[in-house]
Amino acid sequence: MDMKKLQSFYLVAKYGTLMRAANELKVSFPAISVQIKKLERELGVSLFLHLANRLILTEQGQGFFKEVGEVFKALERAKASIASDEDSYAGKVSISLGTDMAKFFAPQIASFLRQHPRLRMMLLTRQPSETMSLVASGEVELGIGRFRGVPRGIRKIKLFENGVSLVFPPRHPVSRLDRIQVKDLAPYRLILLQQGSATRNAIDRVFMRCGVDSQNVIEVGTCHSALDLVREGIGIALVHDICVLSESDKKLHRIDMAEFFGKKEVMLIYRASALLRMPHRELIEIFVKTAQSS
């Protein structure tokens, strides 16, 4: 039983499709299929049920997948045990996080990569729910976001608490108010994150409770798009604190609105079973220190 067969089986079982496994191994679609068939003949069992657009593990396949996974983990540990310091910063690191988090941590990530030029990084910008799925499935090693809950098998590290800030131009009428209430926002054009996001849902609930009609709204995909519109004098915006903190602009004035909209934890997550190498551990330390100093 050679490693090609085991790799082919493991990746097909992990992703559920021959095509994705073939792309990762950089071989043809038929080549993966041949390896799977050879492995099934060698074992004398069917490892997969073939559905329309997906392969599902049989009962025997599930047990075999678990054991093969342990084999690959053991190989990773063996390689790590003999790797030199230089070699330990080769290979790839994968991270999934929101666009606001990516911008906030960008200077630290860039500095880290400049120090370790042989290290490749896959940096994905995704919504928290997708980040959680990617980490849980093992497709991504580290995730950062505001997560509603963390399932078993996932470890979390609290980075900081992030709330909502009101951002407006220097001479906007709201700047003359001694203490801004939610109802004070009603007369003005509001720039908000798009409907469906957790932050927008929280804002809409508070608006409804305070009797604020949010019809005069411009929706944007990211906080930084909202800040650009504020600079142009288009309206006032409710954005994540972290996005304002990563900006340094005299055209923007900020008021903390946590009193009304609360704060949510920003966490770093990874699988409890993950084999964290030196680059992962150093990145986690960098993220924690950056968050603590913000």
Image: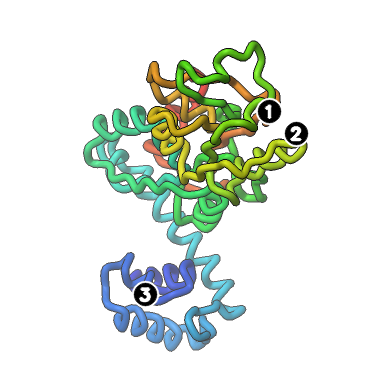
SS type, badge 1: helix
Judging by the rendered image, the residue that carries numbered circle 1 is: 182
Spot occupied by residue 140 in the image (x, y as percentages of width and height): 45, 51
Q: Residues within 10 Å of mark 3 (few under 14, many from 20)?
A: some
Give the residue displayed 31% in from the left and 83% down from the top: 30
Judging by the rendered image, the residue that carries numbered circle 2 is: 210
Label 1 vs 3, first from the N-terminus = 3
From this viewpoint, is residue 1 visible?
Answer: no
Q: Amino acid at mark 1?
A: Val
Spot occupied by residue 78 in the image (x, y as percentages of width and height): 39, 49
Q: Residues within 10 Å of mark 1 (few under 14, many from 20)?
A: some
SS type, badge 2: helix
Judging by the rendered image, the residue that carries numbered circle 3 is: 19
Spot occupied by residue 41 in the image (x, y as percentages of width and height): 43, 88
Question: Is residue 40 or residue 105 the one in the foreground?
Answer: 105
CB contact under 8 Å: marks 2 and 1: yes
- Furthest-right residue in this view: 209
Give the residue displayed 58% in from the left and 79% down from the top: 60
Q: Amino acid at mark 3?
A: Met
Spot occupied by residue 13 in the image (x, y as percentages of width and height): 48, 71
Tag in front: 1 or 3: 1
Give the residue displayed 49% in from the left and 24% down from the top: 168
Mark 2–mark 3 Cα distance, whole angstroms, equals 52 Å
Residue 216 picture quarter:
top right
